[in-house]
Image (cartoon, rainbow, N blue to C red):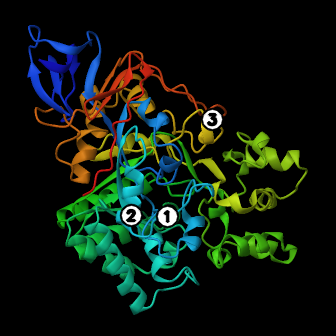
């Protein structure tokens, strides 16, 4: 007798092995049988004839640290077959935060009506675990957050003192003890951009003692791409840590050979003993916060001081003089390649390019338009996001052709109702997984279905060090997605991004049906996974 039997489906087990037609039985939270279960009984029998039965999809790079506290049901993820996501990426995490007031501006998706009641990483994970979670959640501890905490949130855009680095080491070790799955850096963002390589290496030596993963948003992916990727590889080699290079595709402005050269650098590092893999967003449009347009010094003093600087006409020229812009299309004046994605105070402008908004406002310099939008958003300025047509499809294809390339969303969980109903974050929020399988397997035929599924299941779990998820195996947790490979379709667009994909029929999280026959159930069986 089984709780659930999935019958007649084509099992793609997450290892990359050829699919097989078998039944799968679930009791409680785990897979308890795989084989011919035609004679067995079950409380629920799902006929998956003509459908793919795979492990639940795993998103190893999200920024849902706070949005899951607003609405933990993770509708935008569960509706596309995701059963596990990893938060705390790019150096941004919700904890540890002994100086939480200074941290608020660094938290993606922060909303003032949610009380920050925690200080330690353990306390944050506990609060998160008390939410009704639609998906399982694991968390990195972010380098930027450690910096803010160790430096008391003051004058954080400078090299840290030896005493402050020791405090970062202490906080990192404590967070790893309390369940952080790894450590992340965001070296293009304040305050991580002010940290020298030696600081990152010292912290990674702490990480090495726990054998957890180091995930990095590198310092540069365009005109100085060699330095950005080279630094990451050198840190991993010297600290002896496992390395995950986040959203590796070179950006607008990089030389044409940058992706191929980067892969060569990775190959050389592997020959030198470095355990390294990487991932991409399956989209040519990449998102980030609009405040990243500002030079590092502009962030000193937090949001109040930033707004004062934005309102000061005498500082406008200095605010536009950023020697290390997040996107090279800004100094190139390619405002037509950047769209405003999420802006509450000027929501009518969402979906327009910055060039279009500037023309609409009759502003000669679109850079002024960007700074005005940030100023008009007020204290919510850190939640303004934009997206740029930054990535070359040829680079994405080259990455996907590498067996160690994972696939990520780089987004936050949303829902088309309630407090998140009008939020937008990135082009990939509602459709990253479906777009990847649809585009690179079904349309481009660049990889097999089995390998496509491995990239977002077994490979992801392996990189994270999670042993009982990511593959269909007797004894593993029953995180399962059932879909039609022919009907799977990403319905989101740049102008209308918050649309669920087609083709996802059933999603099971820890043995409970979260999506049944294409409809959301009341089950929220996800949980916080501590390392």
Packing grade of label 1 (10 A; few <14, some 14-19, many >=20) is few
Looking at the image, which is closer to me, 398 or 6? 6
Looking at the image, which is closer to me, 250 or 89? 89
Q: Earlier in the sequence, mark 3 or mark 2?
A: 2
Element under label 2?
Answer: helix
Q: Eyeballing the image, is 505 above or below 448? A: above
Give the spatial CA distance, label 2 vs label 1.
8 Å
Q: Is residue 21 left or right of residue 48?
A: left
Instruction: Check disc 2 and report the residue beneath it.
Output: 123
Task: Report which quarter residue 301 is drawn in.
Answer: bottom right
Q: Where is residue 48 shown, x and y percent of the image? A: 27, 13
Q: Eyeballing the image, is 16 above or below 176? A: above
Instruction: Check disc 3 and report the residue beneath it.
Output: 494
Q: Where is residue 188 shown, x and y percent of the image? A: 52, 67
- At 77% from the left and 42% from the top, the residue drawn is 349
Q: Is residue 209 left or right of residue 201?
A: left
- At 52% from the left and 47% from the top, the residue drawn is 391
Q: Where is residue 426 shown, x and y percent of the image? A: 57, 43
Q: Where is the N terminus found, in terms of image quarters?
A: top left
Given contact means CB atoms under 8 Å apart, are the residues at marks 2 and 1 in contact? yes
Element under label 1?
Answer: loop
Q: Is residue 248 visible?
A: no
Instruction: Check disc 1 and report the residue beneath it.
Output: 117
Given contact means CB atoms under 8 Å apart, are the residues at marks 3 and 2 in contact? no
Q: Eyeballing the image, is 387 above or below 241? A: above
Q: Earlier in the sequence, mark 1 or mark 3?
A: 1
Element under label 3?
Answer: loop
Q: Which one is closest to the eye, mark 3 or mark 2? A: 2
Q: Earlier in the sequence, mark 2 or mark 1?
A: 1
């Amino acid at each position: 007798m089984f709780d659930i039997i999935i019958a007649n489906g084509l099992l793609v087990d997450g290892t990359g092995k050829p699919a097989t037609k078998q039944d799968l039985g679930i009791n409680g939270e785990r897979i308890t049988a795989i084989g011919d279960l035609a004679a067995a009984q079950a409380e629920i029998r799902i006929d998956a004839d003509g459908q793919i039965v795979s492990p639940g999809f795993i998103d190893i790079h999200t920024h849902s640290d706070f949005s899951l506290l607003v609405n933990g049901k993770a509708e935008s993820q569960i509706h596309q077959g995701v059963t596990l996501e990893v938060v705390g990426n790019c150096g941004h995490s919700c904890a540890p935060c002994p100086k939480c007031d200074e941290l608020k501006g660094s938290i993606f998706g922060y909303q003032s009506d949610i009380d920050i009641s925690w200080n330690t990483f353990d306390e944050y994970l506990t609060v998160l675990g008390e939410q009704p979670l639609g998906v399982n959640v694991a968390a990195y501890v972010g380098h930027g957050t450690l910096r803010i905490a160790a430096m008391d949130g003051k004058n954080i855009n400078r090299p840290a003192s030896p005493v402050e680095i020791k405090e970062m080491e202490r906080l990192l070790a404590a967070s790893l003890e309390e369940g952080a799955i790894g450590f992340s850096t965001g070296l293009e963002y304040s305050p991580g951009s002010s940290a020298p390589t030696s600081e990152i290496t010292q912290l990674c030596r702490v990480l090495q003692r726990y054998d957890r993963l180091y995930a990095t948003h590198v310092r540069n992916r365009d005109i100085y791409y060699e330095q950005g990727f080279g630094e990451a590889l050198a840190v991993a080699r010297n600290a002896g840590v496992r390395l995950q290079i986040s959203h590796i595709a070179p950006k607008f402005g990089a030389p044409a050979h940058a992706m191929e050269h980067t892969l060569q650098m990775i190959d050389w590092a592997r020959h030198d003993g470095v355990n390294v893999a990487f991932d991409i967003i399956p989209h040519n449009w990449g998102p980030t916060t609009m405040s990243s347009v500002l030079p590092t010094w502009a962030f000193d003093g937090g949001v109040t001081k930033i707004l004062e600087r934005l309102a000061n006409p005498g500082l406008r020229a200095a605010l536009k003089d950023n020697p290390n812009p997040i996107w090279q299309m800004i100094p190139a004046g390619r405002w037509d390649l950047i769209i405003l994605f999420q802006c509450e105070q000027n929501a009518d402008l969402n979906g327009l390019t910055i060039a279009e908004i500037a023309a609409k406002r009759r502003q000669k310099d679109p850079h002024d338009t960007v700074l005005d939008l940030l100023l008009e958003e007020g204290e919510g300025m850190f939640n303004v996001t934009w997206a740029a047509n930054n990535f070359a499809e040829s680079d994405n294809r080259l990455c996907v052709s590498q067996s160690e390339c994972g696939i990520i969303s780089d987004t936050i969980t949303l829902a088309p109702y309630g407090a998140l109903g009008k939020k937008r974050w990135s082009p990939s929020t509602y459709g990253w997984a479906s777009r990847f399988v649809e585009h690179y397997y079904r349309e481009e035929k660049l990889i097999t279905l089995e390998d496509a599924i491995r990239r977002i299941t077994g490979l992801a779990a392996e990189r994270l060090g999670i042993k009982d998820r990511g593959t269909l195996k007797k004894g593993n947790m029953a995180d399962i997605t059932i879909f039609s490979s022919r009907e799977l379709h990403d319905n989101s667009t740049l102008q209308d991004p918050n649309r669920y994909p087609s083709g996802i029929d059933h999603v099971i999280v820890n043995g409970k049906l979260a999506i049944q026959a294409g409809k959301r159930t009341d089950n929220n069986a996800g949980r916080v996974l501590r390392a």
